[in-house]
Image (spheres, grey):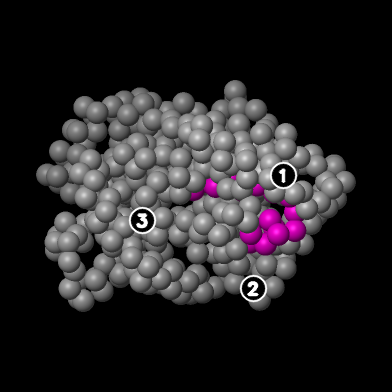
Amino acid sequence: MTTSEVPEPEASRDRHCRAADAAPLRGSREARRGCIAIAGPTASGKSAASLAIAQRWPVEIISVDSALVYRGMDIGTAKPTPDERAQVPHHLIDTTDPLQAYSAAGFVADATRLIGEIQARGRTPLLVGGTMLYFKALMQGLNQMPRADAAVRQAIEARAAQLGWPALHAELASVDPVTAARLFPNDSQRIQRALEVFEVSGQPISAFQTGPDETTPTSPIAPGALLSLEPQDRAWLHARIAQRFDAMLAAGFLDEVRALRARGDLHPDLPSMRCVGYRQAWEALDAHGETLSAPQLAELRDRGIFATRQLAKRQITWLRSMPERRVVACDAPDAQEQVLQWASRWLDAPAGEAA
């Protein structure tokens, strides 16, 4: 997402601060080593791992997720439940209306502020999520990409309507083969942005995404303080993705999307509505009406699960390009025990001795 930056509302910040002030410290260590982080593909167990850490150490969770910022999008984003959010302060959740966009630059500004505030309260910031661009922006910085250009974007959309997105993917491959190689031919959102950046700047978007911004301060996440939950067996993750999507449907996900559509001011081209699951549900309701038959619901399920699996594949690819991460196999029987051992090395060790 590359447009407006949306700060966390004052009321939301005050609520987080009151929750943190009211909760007793469960350890004597102050946050002296910056912050720690848990990343991983969707459905890898990041939330459960972070809650297990919060039960033993005085942490506050900062969400690193481009979908959890949106209000009214609870079921399809697998947002932490009210009970889970009551156990430990969570930040950067429900901060933004779905009509607005939230950017990586906005995340860096918000996360940097929150890290300082949490440390001032004697707690450790625990960054948790699967939006890898946000992690990269926070740890390495982002070069200044060109702003969105409505005229250029409209021209690209017109070409796509005439030729199809696979043709524009081929066009992208001729000017930015690095980016084209990691995108699917129908990934309209990313193909559009990559072509837009090239047409506006004359440089491929991959040139902006490689290498740190020289003005970026040192990463708040020390080497080794980023834990990555990655499956040894991809089939294990695929099964969890299917189970999660089925649970979302059973919990009323389609009703959630219908409520968003009923607002009247949202449309499928918004970043919020392009989130995995929401995009497929919106398209199904557009194609078949507000009530889906059993075969149509089965088709939505298949498309939603497929899109989520592709998202997980991209997330794992991002993670494998981050050599500073420590990996725990999320499908190992003792995965949570390994996570707690890793956290203990950072949160129990004297300052400067964590590894």
Q: Amino acid at mark 1?
A: Thr
Q: Amino acid at mark 3?
A: Val
* Distance in Å between CA atoms under marks 1 and 2: 27 Å
Q: Quadrant of residue 151?
A: top left
Which label's residue is closer to the chain start, 1 or 2? 1
Which label's residue is closer to the chain start, 1 or 3? 1
Where is the N terminus found, in terms of image quarters? top left
Residue at the disc numbered 3: 276
Q: Quadrant of residue 276?
A: bottom left
Secondary structure under badge 3? loop
118, 277: nearer the viewer: 118
Name the mark nearer the viewer: 1 or 3: 1
In the picture, the disc for residue 124 is 1
Q: Is residue 351 above or below residue 249?
A: above
Q: Is residue 304 magenta?
A: no
313, 2: nearer the viewer: 2
Residue 204 seen anywhere in this rendered image of the structure: no
Give left or right: position of 232 versus 98. right
The x and y percentages for residue 262 are: 21, 50
Q: Amino acid at mark 2?
A: Ala
Q: Which residues are magenta?
A: 49-66
The x and y percentages for residue 158 are: 15, 38
In the picture, the disc for residue 201 is none
Residue 121 seen anywhere in this rendered image of the structure: yes
Residue at the disc numbered 2: 332
Which label's residue is closer to the chain start, 2 or 3? 3
Check contact, mark 2 vs mark 3: CB within 8 A: no
* Distance in Å between CA atoms under marks 1 and 3: 31 Å
Secondary structure under badge 2? loop
Give left or right: position of 55 versus 235. right
